[in-house]
Image (cartoon, rainbow, N blue to C red):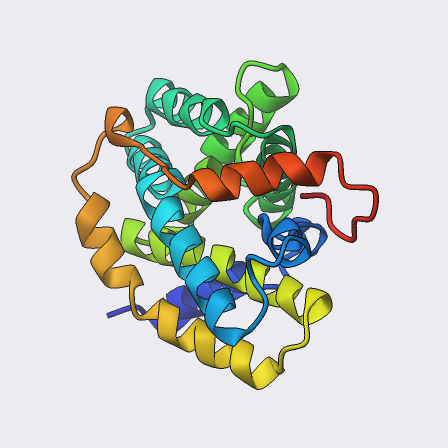
Amino acid sequence: MSSISELMRIVQFGDSMLPVGAFSFSNGLESAVQEGVVHDRESLREFVKTTLDVAATGDGVAVLETHRGSRENDMTRIFAADHAVFCRKLNEEMRTMVVRMGRKLAEMAIHVLPNVPTVKEWLTFIKQGESPGTYPAGQGIVFAAMGLSEQDAFAMHQYGVASMILGAALRLMKISYLDTQQILFEVNQTAAAAYERVADASLEDMSAFAPVMDILAAVHVKSRVRMFMN
């Protein structure tokens, strides 16, 4: 059971208002709404659920790998996971999102956790161009630095994906904040099963199959009217 201080750290770094730039991105929802793929509460729920499934088997694996690498002080393992995330982002805007948020998380963590060498070392390698600095990798590193479990890191990753999309939904479509909170509460209950599904996965097992979402991301690049950066 988490201590009070550990729980507060989880709450702080799981806050949707964490200043890493998540509000600038919709995780593909903007194109989904524009193209009519998402048009009501039920289609939004399905979009979030699908995105979380993809997040768990893809970026979620990297969160666990970097957390374990940080606990073992194994930068080679961290680098491998960081690059694995970046190389699996097919779309330019998705790559921009994942590295921009990752770097912001690293810069913020330096101020919050000034005496943690792993975070400093990772940010140095990002600035030198030796590591892309993806957000899932940063989550694993930072949560390990705070002494929080890999389950906590994975849960916050999944929560962050869902809250980003649902926050964007309030600005993109006609939906009540009550409905978005209901969806969030519902999908959060899938995180434990998702963790069990990928807990023993390796980087070679990372996979993300959602072709419609990849197509929507490609459409967004050339969209003339955009509220979000992806």
Residue at 56%, 73% in the rendered image: 40
Residue 128: which quarter of the image? top right
Q: Position of residue 42 (x, y in %)?
A: 46, 72
Does 144 sit left or right of 18 as displayed? left
Residue 159 can be seen in this image:
no
Residue at 24%, 62% in the rendered image: 192
Residue at 21%, 59% in the rendered image: 193
Question: Relative to 197, does residue 36 appear above or below in the rendering?
Answer: below
Quadrant location of the C terminus in the rendered image: top right
Give 67 or 92, whichever is nearer the viewer: 92
Residue 137 can be seen in this image:
yes
Q: Position of residue 106 (x, y in %)?
A: 59, 38
Q: Position of residue 150 (x, y in %)?
A: 30, 49
Count of numbered marks: 0
Give 221 or 115, whichever is nearer the viewer: 221
Residue 107: which quarter of the image? top right
Q: Position of residue 10 (x, y in %)?
A: 44, 63
Does 64 sit left or right of 22 as displayed? left
Question: Relative to 214, does residue 77 appear above or below in the rendering?
Answer: above
Question: Relative to 170, does residue 133 appear above or below in the rendering?
Answer: above
